[in-house]
Amino acid sequence: MERLIYLNGELVERKQAKISVFDHGLLYGDGVFEGIRAYSGNLFKLKEHLDRLYNSAAAIEMEIPMTKEEMTRAVVDTVNANKLRDAYIRLVVTRGVGDLGINPVKCFEPAVFIIADKVTLYPEEYYKNGLNIITASTRRNIPEALSPRIKSLNYLNNIMAKIEANRMKVPEAIMLNREGYVAECTGDNIFLVNTRGEVLTPPLYTGALNGITRTVIIDIIKDMGLKIIEAPFTLFEVYSSAECFLTGTAAEIIPVVDVDGRKIADGRPGELTIKLKEKFRKITKKDGVKL
Ligand code: PXG
């Protein structure tokens, strides 16, 4: 079946889903987006994703021409039109068509499109054996220039770090902020478990995206009665950790067993990491908006 794409209020066939070369999302990366998943007919944490989308839009002074209720309906309709129960959903809002100058005042209407597709799962061995990752030399964008909390269409900062990972033939890379503290990975948040059994994750001000999965994991850790510490840490804490894992909509929870060629603990996925993954899987069918 040909995919149906939501484009500015209409469901159109993939071939008809076209954006102008004068769209400022394309010309300048001027826009925002979300990556969302549906699990067995449940749009997991859709409200939280939409809140982040509207906050990102507000941060770049762009008004999304739809209410959150209308956007919820548009997402539900798009997934249903494609007869999907498990899906990866890409929701994009661009500044819209303007002229060749950067000035957004000439862009009169943001463009909204939603793509719903099958989820491409990460290889099973990533979860079973854990990831080898590196530290990128590319530092995270500084908040004084552009807040790394905005999920904008300008992902070049992360892409440059991803290219470094590709060069080293590993699937992810740690990004440090300007001060040298660990911020996050190119498309995932990062967590450590130290040898005292405390869980650490970088605070958002270090340059981490406010990950939806990150928040869910923090809540699970608190429910388990474990201590979660949101405080800056360096590569020293990473290299000497008892466990390390990444979180994200696509990856869910994925163990890390090697950073920059140094083994994390015994080089096997950690016990708590595995437990968190199981707990996370259980709630993906519950918390969200039903299709
Ligand atoms: N940090 C960054 C920089 C991200 O882009 C996350 C963390 C995880 O956030 P969520 O809300 O998903 O738990 C993301 C989001 C990809 C890809 O293809 C990944 C993301 C976004 C776009 C593409 O790997 N991850």
Image (cartoon, rainbow, N blue to C red):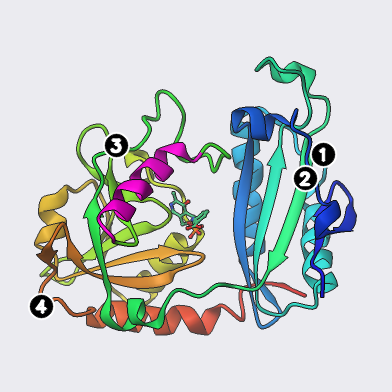
- Report how far apart the C-alphas of labels 4 and 2 lie in the structure: 47 Å
Q: Residue 105, located in which quarter of the rendered image? A: top right
Q: Main secondary structure of the magenta part?
A: helix
Amino acid carrying label 2: it is Val
Check disc 4 and report its element: helix, strand or loop. Answer: loop
- Residue at figure coordinates x 80%, y 78% from the top left: 83
Nearest to N terminus: mark 1 or mark 4: 1
Residue 165 covered by magenta stretch: yes
User: Which disc, if any, is residue 112?
Assistant: 2
Check disc 2 and report its element: helix, strand or loop. Answer: strand
Amino acid carrying label 4: it is Asp
Contact? badges 3 and 2 (CB < 8 Å):
no
Q: Write down the residue under mark 3.
A: 139
In the rendered view, would you say 269 is above or below 189?
A: below
User: Which disc, if any, is residue 266?
Assistant: 4
Asked if one can make out residue 266 in the rendered structure from this viewpoint, the answer is yes
Magenta residues? 155-169
Contact? badges 2 and 1 (CB < 8 Å):
yes
Amino acid carrying label 1: it is Pro
- Residue at figure coordinates x 39%, y 72% from the top left: 253
- Report how far apart the C-alphas of labels 2 and 1 lie in the structure: 8 Å
User: Which disc, if any, is residue 65?
Assistant: 1
- Report how far apart the C-alphas of labels 1 and 4 lie in the structure: 52 Å
Nearest to N terminus: mark 3 or mark 2: 2
Provide residue 106's location: percent of width, then percent of height.
78, 18
Check disc 3 and report its element: helix, strand or loop. Answer: loop
Contact? badges 4 and 2 (CB < 8 Å):
no
Residue 45 covered by magenta stretch: no
- Report how far apart the C-alphas of labels 3 and 4 lie in the structure: 29 Å
Nearest to N terminus: mark 3 or mark 1: 1
Nearest to N terminus: mark 3 or mark 4: 3
